């Protein structure tokens, strides 16, 4: 436990240092320096859930598309640690919701479904454009992950979204077919007039 507390204290001190350095316009801080897992300062801000520090890092050039050695993105980490505000910030800053981890192919949506975070699931789908049917390396979709972990409310939400998408697909298909028929009728009529 002593090591974990020391690590957290060191992380807080580092983030405060970065915060002060970023505020000093004449100071240059390399925000892409990584730890032994390939994580930069923005990963640690994502894990800590501090929107202000994360915003500061982004405003000073920290990349929201960074991945660590295992293929976790900063978005994966913010979802894994349940940080709604930071997750929303990353999506607004251009983070890719459908980025898959190297190890298992999970997206941020898979992680949110596994953890039972309906609020983050909705955010990823509605604001991030997350693909609700994307499969991980083992073939599991976000819906399958939600069901496996007995998160029925999330499963219901995803099924409703799937049904809506399929209905819209059928509606659009009908519109396309109607347009094609109308165009064919016009061409036939034009030929008859010639």
Image (tube, rainbow, N blue to C red):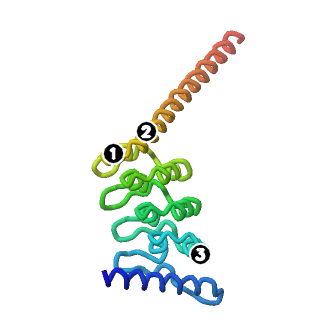
- N-terminal-most mark, 2 or 3: 3
Q: In the shown orientation, is residue 170 left or right of residue 134?
A: right
Residue 143 appears at what percent x and percent y? 38, 43
Q: CA distance from mark 2 to mark 3?
A: 37 Å
Position of 114 relative to 61 (above/below): above
Closer to us: 65 or 3: 3
Residue at the spot 56% in from the left edge and 69% down from the top edge: 51
Mark 2 vs mark 3, foreground winner is 2
Q: In the shown orientation, is residue 41 left or right of residue 142?
A: right
Q: CA distance from mark 2 to mark 1?
A: 11 Å
Residue labelled with disc 3: 56
- Checking the image for residue 101, the label placed there is none
Residue labelled with disc 1: 150
Which quarter of the rendering shows the C terminus?
Answer: top right
* Kind of element beneath mark 1: loop
Residue at the spot 40% in from the left edge and 62% down from the top edge: 80
Residue 97 appears at what percent x and percent y? 48, 55
Residue at the spot 54% in from the left edge and 85% down from the top edge: 29
Which quarter of the rendering shows the N terminus?
Answer: bottom left
């Amino acid at each position: 436990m002593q090591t974990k507390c020391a690590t957290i204290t060191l992380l807080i001190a580092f983030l405060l240092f970065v915060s002060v350095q970023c505020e000093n316009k004449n100071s240059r801080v390399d925000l892409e320096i990584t730890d032994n897992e390939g994580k930069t300062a923005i990963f640690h801000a994502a894990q800590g859930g501090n929107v202000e520090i994360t915003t500061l890092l982004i405003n000073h050039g920290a990349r929201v598309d960074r991945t660590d050695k295992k293929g976790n993105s900063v978005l994966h980490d913010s979802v894994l640690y349940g940080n709604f505000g930071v997750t929303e910030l990353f999506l607004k800053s251009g983070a890719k919701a459908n980025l898959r981890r190297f190890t298992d192919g999970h997206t941020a949506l898979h992680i949110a479904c596994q953890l039972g975070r309906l609020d983050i699931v909705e955010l990823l789908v509605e604001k991030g454009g997350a693909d609700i049917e994307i499969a991980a390396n083992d073939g599991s979709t976000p819906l399958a992950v939600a069901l496996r972990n007995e998160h029925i409310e999330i499963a219901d939400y995803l099924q409703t979204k799937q049904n809506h998408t399929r209905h819209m697909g059928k509606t659009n298909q009908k519109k396309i077919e109607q347009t094609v028929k109308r165009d064919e009728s016009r061409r036939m009529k034009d030929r008859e007039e010639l």
